[in-house]
Structure formats: structure tokens, C-alpha cells
Image (tube, coloured by chain):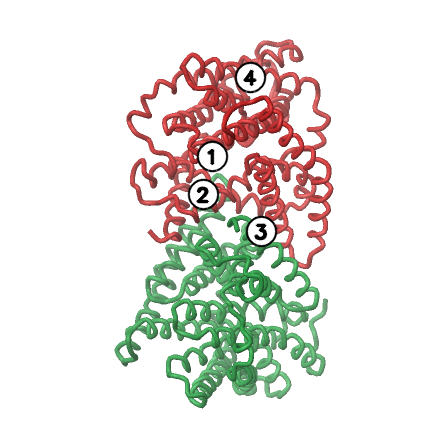
Chain colours: A green, B red
Amino acid sequence: MDTLLSIIAILVLAKVLGELVERAGYPVLIGEIAAGVILGPSLLGLVAHDQVIETLSTIGVIMLLFVIGCQMNLKLFVSSTARMVVTAVTASAVPICAGFLIGTLLHQPLILSFYIAIILSITSVGIVVPTLVGLNRFNTEIGTTIIGVAVLDDLIALTLYGIFSSMAAGNGISSTDLLVSVGISLLFIIGMATVGRFLIRRIFALSSRASSHEVSYAVALILAITGALLSHIAGLNYVIGAFLAGLLLGDLIRVDRQLFDSLTDSAFGFFVTLFFASVGLVLEITPQNLVSPLIVPMLLTAIGAKILGGYLGSIWFFKDVKSALLVGIGLCPKGDLPLAIGKYALLAGLISNELYTTTVLTVVATIVITPALLKQGFKRSAEPAPPG
Amino acid sequence: MDTLLSIIAILVLAKVLGELVERAGYPVLIGEIAAGVILGPSLLGLVAHDQVIETLSTIGVIMLLFVIGCQMNLKLFVSSTARMVVTAVTASAVPICAGFLIGTLLHQPLILSFYIAIILSITSVGIVVPTLVGLNRFNTEIGTTIIGVAVLDDLIALTLYGIFSSMAAGNGISSTDLLVSVGISLLFIIGMATVGRFLIRRIFALSSRASSHEVSYAVALILAITGALLSHIAGLNYVIGAFLAGLLLGDLIRVDRQLFDSLTDSAFGFFVTLFFASVGLVLEITPQNLVSPLIVPMLLTAIGAKILGGYLGSIWFFKDVKSALLVGIGLCPKGDLPLAIGKYALLAGLISNELYTTTVLTVVATIVITPALLKQGFKRSAEPAPPG
């Protein structure tokens, strides 16, 4: 099939399924992944995962994390309260411990236990935010806590992922490797937050003085992809640099409403759709994979550990069981990042197709279950919905 | 070089050169083509014209023609006055005759004379419109005439190009071939204007009822690419279907300001830039090509024939030599279309690299010379600039 025809087939099916899924109250990405599954080797086998679609989906995941970074309020982030930090630590630590435990109990090698731990520790900001907006709880105390914790947990997971990918690329796990990995990760993040921050903002500010508005769009894209390439050179995944670039530019880009809309429209209308579809395209669902012994423990641990982790940290501040449980539930959705990590690990030969399918099914399940649980929980919660 | 790194290199250099060129008062595309020349085989040889860049630049030229189509006023188009039609005919006929004449005088085969005739007959709406806006003459009688004629000349050139490509794909030139080519071209254009119009507008209207705004963006892109693929299947170039899709959707898309801005930003900030750069990437400028005997007659005929053609038609309506000459001068700029046709013809092995380079140099020269001529001409013209 001609590449343009493949792209059209993906876009049409992904947008139709995405719309149906969204009308049913669930995030669009479920429909977009399904489009990839249907067109890919799992079902019809019509669309191949060629180099063009690979490049477009890489730009997609870069834009996705860049836009999510842009939506964060950096000042709120820096002045994050003790509540967010403490909850972020418990909401990461419990799933990580649970991941290593489940890996050990299922006799998986250490690197795979680490993989499971990272996947379980992730909370998707990109899914959490629209879920809270949909439930009209975005600007509540619980909602703010969930978002803050989700952002911090994302950074923790991303750092862990940096360690994981460095470890996986090496031949073994030594404390030197670990130190070097952590060192490079920290160095890159510190570099981005200092020199990078200055340069990125300077370059972007310069672009807004250009003769045409599309120069700002081009420069935002250039900075996102450059950030991604630099983090890749630093041994981390593409997504980390793109997210940091977005975080550092967020306030400047949000001021230019047209630019933010253009980035969002073109990202979610084209590139990100191809990314999610490519997640489904890589997937090879077989009957054996679907009855994998990993799925049930993985999903139960994903939800249980997140609720427990979120509860244990936030209960000290909320002093209210229902609110603390709602924070835990709100942190359950996993989204783009585990899919990106899973896809990377699969293509790098680090994990089996079985574990990749388990990851994708777990992600989809957490995305589908969370809005329903949260809806019921808020109904019974003491905290009222904000007016309007 | 990694594909993402190539894309970044192209974007950075193209936007820097484009900005410099724009500040000097010339259209951005000159700088973007130059970026391709510098990075491509003509100079540094750093970036290869691989399948990813080829696909992105195809999407680029599709979006370019789609956006230009969107900017047209279809009603004005349909109710176009006798003035526009008569001038369009003379402004096409004179360059076409001149092209066949120059081809014959230079002992070129008939298919190459036809190629030269098409290239000479083209006026770029995409260059004419920003040129007139920059000179504050967009909404004058002369400006309106130039734009209307440019649009009609575009359609004439596109139809001729359909005949040319069908002829070129065949083994010879028979009157049956010619009839079939014209028949298919007309059938496609009539089909798009009737059934296509209904379907395209229906599908787009449906998309505006979707839950997320990016669905409209995706659907606009889907319709543009589908139109392009259909015109390709009908034996015409991609650009024709994309332009018609834009023309048929223009009023609906212009109403949604955010969508129009998103399409423009992402087109000119990314895809179209890669298209223009790829024009330069394909180019192999050698000293022999630069001293080609074709360049001087080609450029002089391009400008002379357009001015004469525009003058001969419009003088009957303006009754004023200066105004009629200004219409002719305003019609001189060639842009994206001859580059697209030239690139297609080069890649299909229909024209030599020498003729391709001549085409590109002629295009660049007309773009650079026209604004200066027009500026001087309007200064001496009787027609006053509109207030504001």
C-alpha cells in the first residue's frame, strides 16, 4: 500500500473510532490504538509499520510530551507543596515495590521486574487532566493534588526509565553503571533546567519577532525535537527532552493562543494519532498473549498499588479517607509513557511480545476503569464541585 | 544522518534563510529552496532526499495547494467577470505560444516545448496574493483582477499539466490520447465540482460536530490528501485534487478561524517548508547548468509574454495603458506549481537536470523581480491606494 494511502487509512479509522470512544466517555487514544490493531498484523494486516510511519509517530510522541509540558504551570510546579511531594513519593514507591515483588513472585529476571515496576509507577498527566476536566473537578483541592502528583510521578518514572534504558543498553548491572546512568540523567535534567532553559527561552522569544507567525510554530517544533534528540544522546528516551522543553516554554507558548492551538490541532489531529495507531500497529495480539498469566496480577497490582500509594501520602494532609482514596484512584490512569516505553523496549528486544501486550492491555484497562471509579467516588465525596 | 536530525537541519536553515529573505522584502520560499540547495548535493551534501522527506514534502505541496484553495472566494470565482476570463485567456495564450515558439527555435522536442509552454503560462496565486498584500493593493480593481486571472490561469495550467503528464506517461501523442487525457481531466474536475463538492462538504460539516477540535484538522487533512490521491488516480498531479478540495471547502474552513490558523501554521511552519527545501535538495547545480543557453531566453520570455498577455486582455476593460501593464506585471510571479511540475518531470525522467535548474532559476527570478517592478508601477499609476 502506498504510504499516503496508509496514512489516510490510519487517520480515517483512528478518528472514527476515537470519536466513538470519546462519545462513550473514554479517552480518544483507546480508539486510535484500536485503529492500529485493526489495520496492523493483529487483524487485517493492511498497513505496514514502515520508516515513514515510524518517523511521523516519533514526531507524534515528541509533540505529545511537549504539549503536555506546555500545559503545566512551572511556577505552581516549583512552589509545589509538601502534600504533592510526599504523595508523589508514596504513590511511586508503593507501585515500584509491588512491581519488583510481582516480578520476583513470577520468577522474572531483575531487568523485567524493573520494567514492570516502572510501568506500575507511571501516572499519565495527559489522561489525568482531561479526565478531571470531564468530571468538572479540575480546579478542586483533590484535582490539583492529583495533577501535581501525576507530574512529579512522571518525572520520577522518566528518571527511572533513563536508568532502565542505560542498564538495558549495558551488559550488566553494576553500581558504577547505576551511578553513571543516574549522573547522566541528572546532568541532562540540570543542564536543561539551567543553560537549556536560558537558551530555549531566548531562541523562542527571538522567533516571536519573526515576520510570519508560522516561524514560531517551526521554532517550537525545532526546540521540542532538539530537546528530544539531546535527551536521546544523553542516553534517555526522546520523550524526556521534549517534555522538559515544553515545561520550560509553557508560559511563553500559552500566551500565544494561536500557536498553542496550532500545536494542539496538528499534534492531536495528525502526529499523535499516528503515534497511538503505531502502538497498535506494532502489537501482535495472539490467543496465547491474551491468556497470559501476567495480565490479571499486572492489572490488579497497577490499580491496587496506585490507590494505596496515593492514599498513604495524601491521608496525612487531607485527614479524610474518601479524599485520600480519590487521590489514589485519580492517579491510576496510565497513558502514552508506558506505551512509549513498552514500544521502545519491545523494538529493542528487551521485553517479549507477551509482556508488551500485557502492558498495553493494562494501560487501556486503567484508562477505561478510572473515569468510572472517579465518577462514583466524587459523588460520595465530601468536597463539593466548584460552581460553574 | 538520522532522519530527525535531517529534518531539524532543514527546518533551522530554511527558517533562518526564509526570515532573512522575507526581511529583504521577498517571499520566504526563496530562502527555503536555498536551504535545500545548501544542505543537498549541490553544496554540502549533508541531507539525503529519502523516503521520509519525500512523503513529508508531498504532504507539504498538498497542504500548500489546499490552503491556497481555501483562501479563494468560490462565489467571486463563479461570478467572475468577463474581464477576468478574457484576461486569463490572453495571459495564458501568449505565454503558451511563446513557449512553443522558444522550444521550436531552440530545437527542443515537442513534449519539452509543451513543458516550457506550461511553465511560462503559470501564475502563482500563492506568491501574487502576499505580494499584493505587502504593497497594500490587495483590494484594488487592479489587485482583484490580478488575483482572479491568476486563479483562472492556475486552473488552465493545471488542466494543461494533466494533459502533459498523461501524454508523457504514454508512448506517443495521438489525438485519441489527447481526447482521453482531456476527458479524464474534465471528468475529474466535473466530478469534484458536483458529487465531490457534496460529499466533501457533508463530511467536513459532520466533523465540526465532533467532540474535539482537532478532528476538524484531521478531516481537512484527510480530504486534502484524498482529493490529491483521487486526482493522481485520474492521471493528474496530486496538487490539482488538493487545490479543488480547498476551493470547495474554503468558506467552511475560513469560518473556523482556529482551524484555518492551525492549517496555515503547520503547513508553512513544517510541511511546506520541507517541500520547498526538497525542491532545493533535488537540485544539482553545476557550472554547466548555470551557463545553460536556456536561461536567458526562458526568463525574458517568461516576463515579456506574461506582461503582453495580461496587457492584451485587460486593456479592453481598463482603457488605461498603465493599469493594463500593471495587471501584466502582477501576473509574472511563478511559485510552487512550476517547481512541483518541474520536480515531478525531473523525477519521472521527462526533463533534463539542466531544464529543471532553468525552471527553478526562472521561478526564483520572477518572484524576486515582480515586487520591485510592481512597486515602481503602482507609484506611477493613476489608481490610488485604498485608505488604511
The one nearer the camera, A353 or A383, is A353
Residue B344's disc is 1
From the top left corner, tell me how far across and down residue B200 is, in percent.
69, 44
Look at mark 2 in the image and give the residue it sits on: B274
Residue A8's disc is 3
In the rendered view, tell whether residue B145 sits above or below residue B214: above
Circles 2 and 4: CB atoms closer than 8 Å: no
Host chain of mark 2: B
Q: Nearer the viewer, mark 2 or mark 4?
A: 2
Look at 41% across and 80% down and name the residue there: A112
Residue B322's disc is none
Rendered-image quadrant of the C terminus of chain B? top right
Query: Taking A233 as reference, is B143 left or right?
Result: right
Look at 43% across and 24% down and name the residue there: B362
Say few, some or many: other residues with alpha carbon within 10 Å of mark 4 (under 14 / 14 to 19 / 20 or more).
Answer: many
Look at mark 4 in the image and give the residue it sits on: B328
In the rendered view, tell whether residue B375 sits above or below residue A263: above
Q: Earlier in the sequence, mark 2 or mark 4?
A: 2
From the top left corner, tell me how far across and down residue B93 is, in percent.
57, 16
